């Protein structure tokens, strides 16, 4: 029989759920350990050897690493607010699930899967019950400590997102105080450039756009405001912005949507009825 001891009944029940997903039958019962009630999960290791390993592996990787992260956020980094914790943990969960490669790529590569599996396999040879806290403290210490790196990256990302939201709100407030100057602006995102067109589908060149920019935007917020795109749009404050593109997930397009909200329409390139002429580099300036 394989037995593993937890301080918390919630941990025991969570592990049991992972065993169930592996079609592995287990039982939970209470026990006194160091004069405190603990909870033992028992399973027949002769019948379900691989299922036990798989259940333990997924329990630690998918549940306990988030629990560790929540503890670190609260105790190491003093993020006590439940909403802030939830936002940061969401980023960590996405990182651990392989959905945030742009963040995980910043962490030094290490074979987490191989490390964890190699440290779980010997457990099934133990004759005595395994205490989960001791397992983490000794065998899995490197994995626990590595989780700090995920927490740190997630905190940085959360702070950047907060700054971005403040930036967007600041520009929404600016926009709310502007009188509409243009009925419609067309933005054409091609492979080589971003082109502006007015309501009559006449292209607005760079020098024309810059002449329209409210210079206070560049003076008051020089770090945040893109003088070639966001600043001209804010200065013109159009009632409608038609964006023609092949990928609406481009960061600049999402920022335009976040600032101008319901004013923005996303359309395919084929829907643009104007004439697009790619700029030809001046050979004399090359």
Image: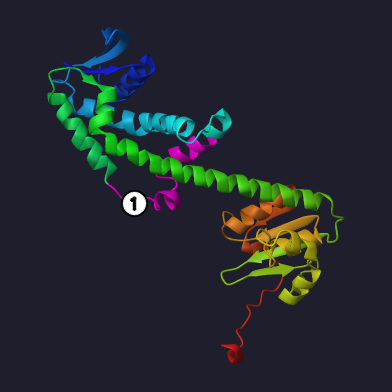
Residue 31 seen in the figure: yes
Lateral position of residue 283 relative to residue 206, left or right = left
Q: How many marks?
A: 1
To which quarter of the image does residue 227 belong?
bottom right
Residue 40 vs 268, above or below: the answer is above
Return the x and y of residue 246 as percentages of the image width and height. 57, 60
Residue 215 vs 58, above or below: the answer is below
Q: Residue at x 61, y 87 (%)?
A: 282
Return the x and y of residue 55 as percentages of the image width and height. 28, 27
Residue in front for this viewpoint, 184 or 65 = 65
> Looking at the rendering, in which quadrant would you find the N terminus?
top left
Q: Over which residues does the magenta segment extend?
A: 87-110
What element does badge 1 sit on?
loop
Return the x and y of residue 143 as percentages of the image width and height. 30, 38
Q: To which residue does mark 1 refer?
A: 108
| Residue 207 is covered by the magenta coloring | no
Residue in front for this viewpoint, 248 or 49 = 49
Lateral position of residue 46 relative to residue 3, left or right = left
Return the x and y of residue 253 as percentages of the image width and height. 63, 57
Q: Residue at x 79, y 66 (%)?
A: 215
Lateral position of residue 235 relative to residue 279, left or right = right
| Residue 98 is covered by the magenta coloring | yes
Q: Residue at x 44, y 45 (%)?
A: 99
To which quarter of the image does residue 222 belong?
bottom right
To which quarter of the image does residue 188 belong?
bottom right
The colour scheme used to paint the residues is rainbow
Crowding around mark 1 (Cα neighbors within 10 Å: few <14, some 14 to 19, many 20+) is few
Residue 202 seen in the figure: no
Q: Residue at x 68, y 50 (%)?
A: 168
């Amino acid at each position: 029989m394989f037995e593993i001891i937890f301080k918390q009944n919630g941990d025991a029940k969570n592990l049991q759920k992972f065993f169930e997903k592996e079609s592995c039958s287990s039982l939970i019962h209470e026990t006194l350990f160091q004069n405190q009630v603990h909870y033992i999960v028992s399973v027949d290791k002769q019948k379900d050897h691989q299922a036990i390993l798989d259940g333990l592996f997924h329990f630690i990787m998918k549940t306990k690493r988030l629990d560790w992260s929540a503890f670190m956020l609260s105790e190491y980094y003093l993020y006590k607010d439940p909403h802030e914790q939830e936002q940061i943990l969401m980023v960590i969960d996405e990182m651990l699930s392989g959905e945030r490669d742009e963040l995980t790529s910043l962490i030094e590569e290490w074979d987490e899967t191989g490390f964890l599996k190699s440290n779980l396999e010997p457990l099934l040879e133990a004759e005595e019950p395994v205490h989960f806290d001791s397992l983490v403290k000794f065998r899995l210490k490197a994995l626990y400590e590595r989780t700090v790196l995920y927490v740190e990256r997630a905190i940085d990302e959360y702070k950047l997102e907060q700054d971005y939201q403040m930036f967007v709100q600041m520009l929404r407030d600016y926009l709310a105080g502007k009188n509409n100057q243009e009925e419609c602006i067309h933005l054409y995102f091609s492979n080589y450039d971003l082109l502006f067109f007015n309501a009559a589908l006449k292209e607005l060149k760079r020098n024309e756009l810059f002449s329209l920019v409210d210079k206070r935007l560049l003076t008051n917020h020089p770090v945040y405001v893109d003088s070639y795109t966001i600043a001209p749009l804010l200065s013109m404050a159009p009632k409608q912005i038609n964006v023609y593109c092949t990928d609406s997930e481009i960061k600049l397009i999402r920022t335009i949507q976040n600032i101008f909200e319901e004013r923005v329409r996303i359309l395919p390139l084929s829907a643009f009825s104007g004439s697009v002429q790619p700029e030809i580099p001046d050979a004399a300036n090359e």
